[in-house]
Amino acid sequence: MKYCWEYTDDYLEYRNSLGLDTKNPRWYIKDFSRYLKESYPNETIITEEMVIPWCIARPTEKSYSFKTRMSSLRQFTIFTYSIGVCEFILDTSFTPKAERYVPYIFTDQELTNLFDIAIRNSVQDPNSYKKLIISVIYRLIFYCGLRPNEGREIMISDINLNDKTIFIRKNKTHKERIIPISDDICEMIKGYMRRSSVFKMNSPYLFSSPRLDSYKSTWLRTEFLKLWEAIKEPSNLARVRVYDLRHRFATTLMMKFLEEGKDLSNILPYMSSYMGHSSFEETAYYIHLLPDRLRTSKAIDWKKMESLIPKVLS
């Protein structure tokens, strides 16, 4: 017989067996387990009365953290309910959906300026391995439509320049996939690998940190914002993210297909697979980001799209 606070590891092992993320929910579920152990050390069944006090928002808790904590707990109650040790499933009213972030769509000139200044900084300081990385990594993320984490975690063994492909490893809930790359991207990677070999990092990662592992997401974000601050118009107060490069890639691809008069509903499966989306709804979201003239294109079959396109909250 187990006490109610002893099911944490069972739940995390279950998530891991499904290939789901365990890092993010681990802290919250462990914290909930400690709460149960301290408050109900001898109970074997989890009740609503026991759970609700832990659901109260904490004084310094940010809205996002609260939603993540409640979402983690709801998934835990689903699991424990299914094995008969919890009397209820936490109501979704505790886990309101966050408003979808409306990405910033960079102009062609902004992208040119971003990439140019990164290249210029590297050329002016050829002894800086970090500046060499910065001159390439953001271009690779944009031109391949990668998630930022996918870009920074690419390993040298993932790149096949003969077949002109990159193997994108499984990341959290995202599936692994192989994406084709253009001749220009191949040449960019070849040039980068040739120059980076001088630094003799002896790391399996394409973009190696001084610790010989991949750079952290905070580093990727910080360096990107430095470039942005250097090239943006002073009056432009927009909040930008590295992820917006991926959004711009997706809208650029859609615009190309629409201007060629292709039926977007037939293109979505291809785009969804290429970008590693788990559903067509994720890909259809980008239609909201298209210019008005293209959103009204006859190439979009709105009867097919109506059920796919999610609502965007601004």
Image: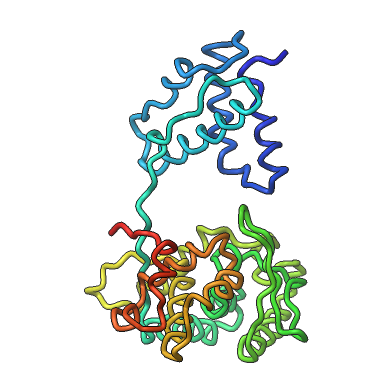
Q: How many marks?
A: 0
Say which of 183 and 237 sits in front: 183
* Residue 30 placement: quadrant: top right
Relative horizontal placement of residue 10, taking residue 256 as reference (left or right): right
In the figure, 11 relative to 103: above or below? above
57, 232: nearer the viewer? 57
User: Which coloring applies here?
Assistant: rainbow
- Residue 141 sits in which quadrant? bottom right
Taking the image as shown, residue 57 lies to the left or right of residue 6, namely left
Residue 120, horizontal then vertical, whole percent: 48, 86
Residue at screen point 44% across, 83% down: 117
User: Which residue is drawn at the image coordinates 58% and 62% (left, top)?
Assistant: 149
Q: Decide which of 62, 255 is in the foreground and name it.
A: 255
In this rendered view, identify the residue nearer to me: 10 or 34. 10
Q: Quadrant of the C terminus?
A: bottom left
| Quarter in which the N terminus is drawn | top right
Which residue reaches farthest left?
A: 235
**Quadrant housing residue 313:** bottom left
